[in-house]
Image (cartoon, rainbow, N blue to C red):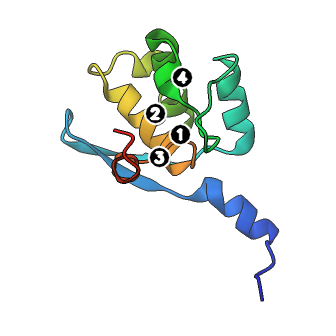
Amino acid sequence: MVKRLTKSDILEGARKRVNLYIKEYDAEVVIRPLTDGELTKLFELLGEIPLREDGTPDFSKIGLSKNFELLRHAAAIGLVDPKLTVEELEQMRFGVPEFIGMKVLEISGVVRSEAEARKKGER
């Protein structure tokens, strides 16, 4: 018998917390997955998003500046500790906000992890 989905199950997703090690700072931050509503608003920044055959976004076909903007916004929404704005994230070392944003999107189920992509032969 299949388990019935409860309201608690649905709301648990955004409560998940993941410690993420940032080697450039030799420290950890805490991130969380984004909700469907947050992802919808985030993707509105890009306009139309090209998709892979499996329905996941193909960020490789998005312009670099738009891609970086999306990842910084994802990081700003998904960072729990420390909580930073997009403007504050832009003050970080090069590539760190985008790394955080990509990890937020991974735990949100939007993009595959590097390990999953290698298994599928996408990298």
Give the vertical position of 74 relative to 45 (above or below): below
Q: Nearer the viewer, residue 65 or 14?
A: 65
Q: Which numbered circle lies on residue 93?
A: none
Cα separation, mark 1 vs mark 4, equals 12 Å
User: Quadrant location of residue 42?
Assistant: top right
Of the two numbered discs 1 and 4 on the same chain, state the one appearing first in sequence. 4
Residue 114 in the image: x percent, y percent? Answer: 35, 45
For the residues labelled 2 and 4, the Cα–Cα distance comes to 8 Å
The residue that label 2 is drawn on is: 101
Q: Residue at x 75, y 38 (%)?
A: 37
Residue indicated by mark 3: 112
Q: Nearer the viewer, mark 1 or mark 4?
A: 4
Give x and y (percent) for residue 26: 18, 41
Quarter of the picture containing the C terminus is top left
At label 3, the amino acid type is: Arg
| Disc 3 from disc 4: Cα separation | 16 Å
Q: In this orientation, does residue 13 appear?
A: yes
Q: Are marks 2 and 4 in contact (CB under 8 Å)?
A: yes
Amino acid tagged 2: Gly
Question: Label 1, on which residue?
Answer: 78
Separation of residues labelled 2 and 3 (CA atoms):
13 Å
**Which badge, 2 or 3, is on the more N-terminal residue?**
2
Q: Percent from the top left, x then y, of residue 80?
A: 50, 43
Q: Which mark is residue 70?
A: 4
The answer to the question of whether label 2 and label 1 lie on touching residues, with beta carbons closer than 8 A, is yes
Query: Sequence order check: which comes first, mark 3 or mark 1?
Result: 1
Give residue 27's quadrant in the image.
top left
